[in-house]
Amino acid sequence: MTPEVRRRLAIRTAALAGLCYLALTIMVATGTTQHLDDAVRQWFRPDDVWGQAQIRTGPTIDALEPRRVFAVLAVVGVGASVRRRTWRPLVFTAGVALTASVLTLVSKYATDRPDPSADKFTGGSYPSGHMVADLVCMGCAAMVLCSRTRWWMWALAGLVSVAMALSLLFAAAHWFTDVLGGTLLAVAVLAAASAVPLRSALGPRPGNRSATKTPDPRSARGPTLRSAR
């Protein structure tokens, strides 16, 4: 698959995920999904009882909270910029993180949705900031550290995201559509980020100096005295 084909695929993926996210946001804002959310909440945490499932999955929410994963992404961006001797990785990670954060906060304040406990953190419950932060940070870190991401990187990000989604649902910290919306928003942001020109110009890899290596002046001197004899 050529870079141009990958770029077109990324743009289409971003557009599709963005449209799905917009449609879901409208449904959440109008209350269309509330019956489904209530049913899923009752299935994961019957009668709002805190049991073994909640005890086992609860620590995942604290371990992968947005502040921590964004801090890890910042370290990755700074480290990649220092190692590659270019500002592009840091600008790329900062831009992706800022875009995801702004879109998340705007959506939260626009929908103004309470979580299953009738609380509103950072504006509202929709979309799940945990899902957005975890997916965006893992995907962005992979794109910065590797010139071409591998399937197993996205599989790992998917497994972590599934663990976070289940933890949020078992703990009844978010509605089901909050989790789904956070996933769609993160996919849209990552797909769009992979298509921007800065993504393909993150700087040369360390150790790849063949293109800039200064030629040996002795190679242009012609035959040596010994070879001429």
Image (cartoon, helix red, strand yellow):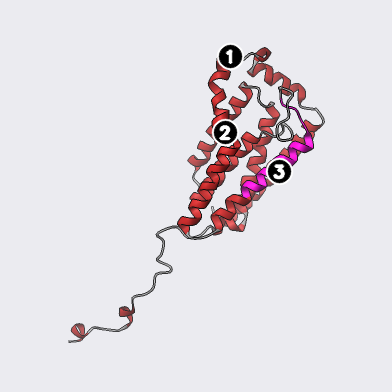
The x and y percentages for residue 130 are 62, 34
Locate residue 165: give its quadrant: top right
Front in this rendered view, residue 192 or 11: 192
Q: In the picture shown, does residue 158 fall above or below 216?
A: above
Whether the residues at callouts 3 and 1 have beta carbons within 8 Å, the answer is no
Q: Quick check: is 78 in the magenta stretch?
A: no
Q: Which range is magenta?
A: 96-115
Position of 119 compared to 190: left or right?
right
The x and y percentages for residue 80 are 49, 53
Pointer 3 or 1: first along the chain: 1
For disc 3, the neighbor class at 10 Å (few under 14, some 14 to 19, many from 20) is some
Whether the residues at callouts 2 and 1 have beta carbons within 8 Å, the answer is no
For disc 2, the neighbor class at 10 Å (few under 14, some 14 to 19, many from 20) is many
Pointer 2 residue: 161
The x and y percentages for residue 42 are 68, 16
Front tag of 2 and 1: 1
Pointer 1 residue: 51
Q: Residue at x 57, y 23 (%)?
A: 58
Specify the amino acid type for callout 2: Ser
Q: Residue at x 78, y 34 (%)?
A: 111
Magenta stretch, main secondary structure class: helix
Q: Which mark is residue 64?
A: none
Pointer 3 residue: 103
Q: Residue at x 68, y 21 (%)?
A: 40
Residue 9 visible here: no
